[in-house]
Every structure is written in C-alpha cells, then in structure tokens.
C-alpha cells in the first residue's frame, strides 16, 4: 500500500479530485519573493532589496541636503537683492533731493531781491499802485511755488541762537533780552522739508559791558 504525498492528487469523500495549492510568499511592498525548493526567501533577494532601499534612502537624504542648501542660497540672494533695492532707492531719493536743493538755492537770491524791492517801493499814485499790485502778484506766485516744493522760511526773532539754524553776523549789547537771543533776522533762512536749506543771518543780543554803561550814563548827564 503506497502513501500519498502532498503533491499527489487526493480524493475527497465525494470522489472529486482536488489539487493542493502551495502559497507563494510576498514582501511588504506586494512583490513576490523568490523562494527555494523548501519555500524560504533566499538571502540574496533580501540583501538586494535592502541594498535598493538603502540606496533610495541615501538619495532622499542627499536631495534633502541639496534642497536645504538651495533654500539658504535663495534666502541669501533675496536678502541681498532687497538690500540693493533699498540702497538704490535711497540713493535715487537723495539725488532727487539734492537736485531740488541746488535749484531752489539758486532761486533764493531772486526772492531776496523781491523782498528788498517790496520794502522800498512806496506807490504814490494810481499808476504806481497798479505796478505795485502786479509786482506783489508775481512775488506771491513765486512764494507759493516754493511752499509747494516744501520750502518754509525761518522765524528766528526772539528765539535762542542756534548755530544749526542761524549764523550770527552782528552782536548788539542789551539788557532787555537774555544773552544769545536773536534780535533781528538780517537775511532770511529757509527750511527744505526737515533740513536747513539756508542758514538765517541774524543779529544776536550780547550783555552790556561796564564801560559801555558808564559811557552811556555820562552822555545822559551831559545832555541834561
């Protein structure tokens, strides 16, 4: 009597033939693992899969490092470009302001002459008054134009002398004002925005000297 082997055809109770199926092992990725005659995965196949996985992992790490380097380079280039843009924009603004300052400075003597002429003109008749009004209209138009450009006159009378804004060209001894007080603006100064366009030439209060006071008292006594 012969014994049945697993690979032979067996008969069930009903007499039908059933073929035994041998399971084929697969890995986690769903790929079929090569097996030997005993149904075990060969060491060579596993080693090959591990090598492939290691290579892919190394490639991913290398790509991550490259990506980080590119990001750092991009951020550095972007920062350098932004600094360059700000610097060139500031330089352009400075050049524009300097061009305006130079142009306006050339016009200030014209304004000075207008003001001197206005202080000396004394219209005596209707014809002169007409000319005077026309002159005043031109002067006002010039002043309004300077205002729109950001030019503003200084008003230093009564203020303390400040060398950042004023230029002292005269000193007047007096006891009516503290020393260093601006008594009079001789040549008008101007601001251009928040900067000094032209310093004001002023007369500044100085303390009276003893000799000056004695001389003044003697002169008063002689007159009396």
Image (tube, grey):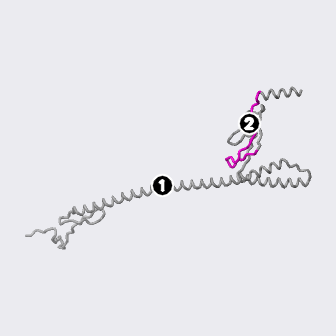
Which element carries disc 1, helix, strand or loop?
helix
- Taking the image as shown, residue 160 lies to the left or right of residue 6, namely right
Disc 2: which residue:
181
In the image, is residue 10 part of the stretch drawn in magenta?
no
Disc 1: which residue:
76
Q: Residue shown at 72%/47% (left/top)? A: 190
Q: Residue shown at 73%/38% (left/top)? A: 159
Q: Residue shown at 84%/55% (left/top)? A: 134
Locate residue 37, reporting x and y percent. 18, 66
Locate residue 175, reporting x and y percent. 77, 31
Tell me the quarter of the picture where residue 16 sits: bottom left
**Which of 32 and 179 lies nearest the eye of the viewer?**
179
**Which of 22 and 76 lies nearest the eye of the viewer?**
76
Q: Check the image and report above or below for 188 versus 175.
A: below
Is most of the magenta stretch helix, strand or loop? strand
Locate residue 79, reporting x and y percent. 51, 54
Which element carries disc 2, helix, strand or loop?
loop
Locate residue 203, reporting x and y percent. 76, 39
Tell me the quarter of the picture where residue 224 sits: top right
Q: Residue shown at 21%/65% (left/top)? A: 35
**Which of 38 and 92 lies nearest the eye of the viewer?**
92
Q: Which residues are magenta?
A: 187-210
Answer few, some or many: residues within 10 Å of disc 1's Cα (few below 14, many 20 plus, some between 14 and 19): few
Answer few, some or many: residues within 10 Å of disc 2's Cα (few below 14, many 20 plus, some between 14 and 19): many
Please count the marks in the image. Answer: 2
Numbered mark located on residue 169 in the image: none
**Which of 191 and 117 lies nearest the eye of the viewer?**
117
């Amino acid at each position: 009597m012969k014994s049945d082997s697993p690979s032979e055809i067996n008969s069930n109770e009903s007499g039908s033939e059933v073929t035994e199926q041998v399971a084929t092992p697969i890995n986690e990725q769903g790929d079929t693992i090569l097996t030997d005659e005993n149904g075990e995965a060969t060491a060579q196949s596993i080693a090959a899969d591990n090598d492939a996985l290691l290579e892919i992992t190394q490639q991913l790490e290398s790509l991550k490092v490259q990506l980080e380097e590119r990001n750092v380079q991009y951020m550095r280039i972007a920062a350098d470009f932004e600094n360059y843009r700000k610097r060139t924009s500031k330089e352009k603004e400075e050049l524009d302001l300097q061009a305006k300052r130079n142009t306006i400075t050339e016009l200030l003597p014209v304004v000075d002459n207008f003001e001197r002429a206005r202080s000396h003109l004394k219209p005596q008749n209707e014809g002169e008054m007409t000319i005077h009004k026309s002159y005043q209209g031109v002067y006002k138009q010039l002043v309004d134009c300077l205002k729109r450009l950001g030019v503003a006159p200084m008003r230093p009378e009564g203020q303390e002398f400040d060398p950042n804004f004023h230029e002292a060209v005269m000193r007047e001894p007096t006891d009516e004002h503290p020393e260093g007080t601006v008594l009079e603006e001789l040549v008008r100064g101007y601001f251009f925005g928040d900067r000094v366009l032209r310093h004001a030439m002023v007369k500044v209060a100085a303390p009276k000297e003893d000799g000056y006071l004695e001389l003044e008292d003697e002169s008063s006594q002689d007159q009396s």
